[in-house]
Amino acid sequence: MKKILIVEDNEMNRDMLSRRLMRKGYEVEIAVDGEDGLQHMRRDRPDIVLMDMGLPIKDGWTATAEAKNDPELRKIPIIALTAHALEADKTRALEAGADDFDTKPVNLNSLIEKIESF
């Protein structure tokens, strides 16, 4: 079973996404901001991270860049999630080191295909 870390500050988004992924058989961990996400990555070593970009304390771009610059974390795939669907947002997320990008609201089937591709 794949362990997925969801880094999301919006409680409704966290709840909806985590319940849907657990029903599909994934183990789900939750972090509420970028710093919390990095701590979970270091402690729990998830198989993949779903990283909201617009986070408090440490935003998703910064947390992603830090993870990808950390030799112990850089191999963990990160899918950037954002409500902003502009090409510039996708480019910025990929430049920060995200391995893929998806928009919110999430299309679960599309997201699962991306998760399984890693």
Image (tube, rainbow, N blue to C red):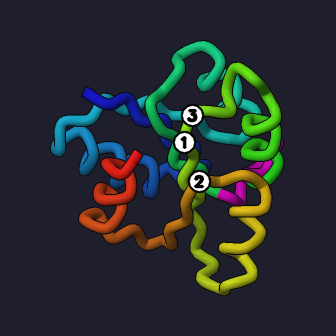
Q: Is residue 54 magenta?
A: yes
Task: Give the secondary structure at mark 3.
Answer: loop
Q: Earlier in the sequence, mark 3 or mark 2?
A: 3
Q: Earlier in the sequence, mark 1 or mark 2?
A: 1
Task: Tell which of 99 and 2 is nearer to you.
Answer: 99
Q: Amino acid at mark 1?
A: Pro
Give the residue displayed 59% in from the left and 53% down from the top: 99
Answer whether labels 1 and 2 touch (C-beta < 8 Å): yes
Residue matched to label 2: 99
Q: Is residue 82 magenta?
A: no
- Quadrant occupied by the C terminus: top left
Task: Give the secondary structure at mark 2.
Answer: loop
Task: Give the secondary structure at mark 1.
Answer: loop
Residue matched to label 1: 77
Q: Amino acid at mark 2?
A: Asp
Residue matched to label 3: 76
Q: Position of residue 13 (x, y in %)?
A: 45, 57
Give the residue displayed 83% in from the left and 48% down from the top: 62
User: Magenta span covers which residues?
Assistant: 53-60
Answer whether labels 1 and 3 touch (C-beta < 8 Å): yes
Answer whether labels 3 and 2 touch (C-beta < 8 Å): no
Q: Amino acid at mark 3?
A: Ile
Q: Position of residue 106 (x, y in %)?
A: 39, 68
Number of residues whose C-alpha sits closer than 10 Å to that of mark 3, classed few (under 14), some (14–19) or many (20 or more): some
